[in-house]
Image (spheres, rainbow, N blue to C red):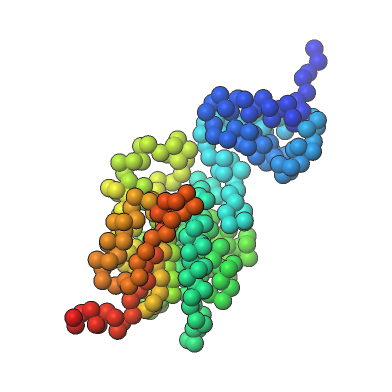
Amino acid sequence: MTRVSWHIGDLLKVTTAYLKKKGIESPRLTAEVLLAHVLGVDRVTLYLQFERPLTEDELSGYRNLVSRRVRREPLQYITGVQEFWSMDFQVDPRVLVPRPETELLVEQALARAGEREPEKGGPCRLLDVGTGSGILAVCLAKALSGWEVWATDISPDALEVARLNAEKHGFGDQIRLRQGDLFQPFKSEEILFHMIVSNPPYVAEEEYGSLPPEVQGYEPRIALAAGKEGMDFITRILHGAPDFLVPGGWLLVEMAPGQTEQAMKIAEGTGFYGEINRVRDYSGRHRVVCAKRLSENSLLGDRES
């Protein structure tokens, strides 16, 4: 009996139908990304080689990856890569898969960084709280070459991924990583930041069970769940950041759209912020809350009045 030889074009067609039947999102794209990964080429090359036959080893490797995706393992964990801000980042189950909406946080940080005058006493400093894979720290280090960039995370495993990504993109020396809970690594240091950014856990415990199986089954819960209403870390960051911001420094926090109004009220209630606003993402939903640290003179005036 003659053994059937699979060609790229036919295999993609059959795999797409199979993934669609299994309820996998974007089945054609998934089939292409996995095959390109196995063959070590880009997706364009697949289209240029539709008639190319696959070896038994290539076919076996591809079947294995397709099986993992059908079990709802995130595509990014299978390939080990996620694109963000036009750069490729290493990701694995130690960290969350970066989401496109987080690019808004980068945009807003850069816009506010551009408002600052050069510091006479040294470079400006930026802190990424809960850095995870390090995407915010790396993207901002790339754009703000004159700034010191710091990043914290409670997970040593996440910090290892962040370190690998910082080194991969050439910012291993510029980005300073510290392990600890939120601002804890700086409690005993006299250091203030000109900007603090954070994409903290903000999934409500009551909503965790409704997350997609890719998220519940594979992404680290510690980087997602944030207590009742998902506000635990957001609240702590809003209350804690003023102690680590220079007067006029900005705090920018990503969160779920339904949390932004409550976050603004919390920020206002601290008495430490002047400008407080929220920014919509490209789908028109509020996504980032921005709060500017009041000057010491403003705080004294408020206390006297």
Q: Residue at x 67, y 32 (%)?
A: 62
Q: Percent from the top left, x then y, of residue 166?
A: 58, 62
Q: Nearer the viewer, residue 51 or 168?
A: 51
Q: Residue at x 49, y 72 (%)?
A: 113
Q: Is residue 255 left or right of residue 173?
A: left
Q: Percent from the top left, x then y, of residue 251?
A: 39, 67
Q: Is residue 189 above or below residue 170?
A: below
Q: Percent from the top left, x then y, of residue 260?
A: 34, 56
Classify the position of the C terminus by image quarter: bottom left
Q: Is residue 304 above or below residue 209?
A: below
Residue 76 visible in rendering? yes
Classify the position of the N terminus by image quarter: top right
Q: Is residue 153 above or below residue 63?
A: below
Q: Percent from the top left, x then y, of residue 105?
A: 47, 60
Residue 40 visible in rendering? no
Q: Nearer the viewer, residue 292 or 215?
A: 292
Q: Is residue 29 left or right of residue 110?
A: right
Residue occupying the far top of the picture? 1
